[in-house]
């Protein structure tokens, strides 16, 4: 165990360093190397952050969803595995809130510059706001609920939150919205100029690596908290079983 911990710590720092390096390279690509958009000007550079983060804010919820299902399955069959799944569910829920917040904020900045308004109750924007509210509710439930079934209730809420993800994704395909049509996979006229792709892919890779780094870091912290809680419970049981001399 003593040899394993430094190794894991070194891997974690290496992963962190790689994420920062990729994000820095993506920043250079997006801000300095990609040609300025002819229609939007420099405001169009928000694309290289808004779109990758929006994509990832729809991926982490399904990791949370899968972890929540495993928790519900294991909570009586194997409580130790259930705790591990619950820690992963919490970590991915927190990252989902962070990424969906950045998605909404960058979208509002972009909307202000291009539409002249900060917000409109467009199906894409509204469904994304609903996703954010669901995961904020998930974290608030875990933080403030005093019920004995808090983790189970949170896992069930995660299942409902996951239902909103395909609605967010398909909203600009199902309805006529003010939000632009899909950039990738939207039809024969979709896609971007090839000169934009390196910056987009570097930022997508950077934010993916960064998100995984934060999930693993938060997962490790939650597992440490669980172990400390279990140790305190065992000590309390041992103390209660001690026979007075």
Image (cartoon, helix red, strand yellow):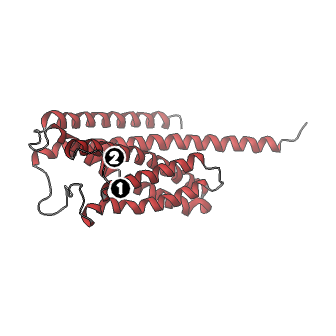
Q: Residue furthest bottom?
A: 174
| Label 2 residue SS | helix
Residue found at x 33% / y 46%: 104
Task: Report crowding for label 2: few under 14, some 14 to 19, many 20 or more residues within 10 A (C-alpha).
Answer: some
Q: Quadrant of the N terminus?
A: top right
| Label 1 residue SS | helix
As rendered, which of 171 and 211 lies closer to the eye? Answer: 171
Task: Report crowding for label 1: few under 14, some 14 to 19, many 20 or more residues within 10 A (C-alpha).
Answer: some
Residue 42 coordinates in the image, percent (x, y): 16, 37
Residue 2 coordinates in the image, percent (x, y): 53, 34
Q: Quadrant of the C terminus?
A: top right
Residue under numbered circle 1: 126
As rendered, which of 61 and 239 lies closer to the eye? Answer: 61
Residue found at x 65% / y 45%: 230
Residue 133 coordinates in the image, percent (x, y): 44, 51
Residue under numbered circle 2: 104
């Amino acid at each position: 165990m003593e040899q394993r911990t430094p190794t894991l710590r070194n891997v974690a720092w290496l992963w962190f360093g790689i994420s920062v390096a990729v994000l820095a390279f993506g920043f250079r690509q997006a801000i300095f190397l990609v040609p300025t958009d002819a229609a939007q000007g420099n405001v169009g550079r928000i694309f290289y952050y808004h779109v990758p983060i929006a994509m990832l804010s729809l991926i982490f919820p399904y990791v949370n969803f899968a972890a929540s299902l495993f928790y519900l399955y294991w909570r009586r069959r194997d409580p130790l595995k259930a705790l591990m799944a619950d820690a992963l569910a919490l970590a991915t829920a927190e990252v989902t809130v962070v990424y969906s917040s950045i998605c909404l904020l960058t979208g509002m900045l972009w909307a202000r510059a291009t539409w002249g308004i900060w917000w409109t109750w467009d199906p894409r924007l509204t469904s994304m706001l609903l996703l954010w509210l669901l995961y904020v509710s998930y974290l608030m439930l875990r933080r403030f609920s005093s019920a004995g079934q808090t983790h189970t209730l949170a896992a069930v809420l995660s299942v409902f939150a996951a239902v909103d993800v395909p609605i967010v994704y398909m909203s600009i395909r199902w309805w006529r919205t003010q939000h632009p049509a899909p950039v990738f996979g939207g039809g024969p006229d979709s896609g971007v100029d090839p000169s934009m792709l390196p910056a987009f892919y570097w930022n997508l890779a950077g934010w993916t690596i960064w998100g995984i780094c934060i999930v693993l870091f938060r997962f490790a912290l939650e597992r440490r908290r669980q172990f400390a809680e279990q140790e305190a419970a065992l000590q309390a049981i041992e103390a209660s079983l001690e026979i007075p001399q």
